[in-house]
Image: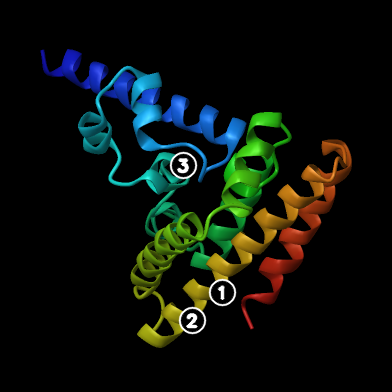
Amino acid sequence: MTGLRELQRRRVHEAISEAAIRLFLERGFDAVPVAEIAAVAGVSKPTLFKYFASKEDLVLHRIADHLGESARVVREREPGLSPLEALRRHFLDRLAAHDPVTGLNDHPDVVAYHRLVFSTAPSLLARLHQHMARDEEALAEALEGSHDRLTAALLAGQVMATQRVLARRNWSMLAEGRPMAEVEPEAVRAAGRAFAMLPA
């Protein structure tokens, strides 16, 4: 029964998410009321808010799935591997997999989703910055095992900013219509250059 309930919960969660993203992409974040999303998803408004704490979370939960990822990479790295090298390898692996979080994914829905996130309401951007701040704090805590507190905090801020700049750059190139075959090697070179700057 527990497994069935969890499956049903995931289905409702996904139905709400899909309805919200579809409507936001069609009409814009500000133009779509939460009540309409609930109706399209076949749930009540109170039920929607049981799954998503805010309207902004209807968009950002896809990014929130990656919260703590950098900290986890540092904690679970191979023995003898520096935190920075583990993070570099992980980012390159995500680029090779065309993970949307790196911005290097040319599926029209992914490009449109990033446009929604980066070019929309101030409240959504503010919520995104809250997510990024928590991610940075988690990474700083993970880095304290290898660095003093100040160094860990500074490095965490630099790593997260580096990943953010690289992802935004990758998305921008694809959104301009440049082909993936042209953008991908450039993205890999940019990542190598960016991570090479961080040890200093």
Kind of residue sitting beneath label 2: Leu
Q: Nearer the viewer, residue 88 or 47?
A: 47
| Disc nearer the start of the sequence (3/1) | 3
The secondary structure type at the circle numbered 2 is helix
Residue at mark 1: 158
* Label 1 with label 2: CB-CB less than 8 Å: yes
Circle 3 SS class = helix
Residue drawn at x 39%, y 72% is 140
Q: Residue at x 50, y 74 (%)?
A: 157
Q: Which residue is mark 3?
A: 59
Q: Mark 3 touching mark 1, by CB under 8 A?
A: no
Cα–Cα span, label 2 and label 3: 29 Å
- Image coordinates for residue 93, horizontal then vertical, percent: 62, 44
The type of residue carrying mark 3 is Val
Residue bearing the label numbered 2: 154
Q: Where is residue 24? Give x, y as percent.
A: 54, 36
Left or right: 151 as drawn, with respect to 96? left
What amino acid does circle 1 point to? Gln
What colour scheme has been applied to the protein in the rendered image? rainbow
Which residue does the image show at 36% across and 84% down from the upper left?
149
Relative to 63, say whether 73 is above or below.
below
Instruction: Decide: few, some or many residues near mark 2? Use Cα within 10 Å; few <14, some 14-19, many ≥20.
Output: few
* Quadrant where the N terminus is found in the figure: top left
Looking at the rendering, which quadrant does residue 8 occupy? Answer: top left
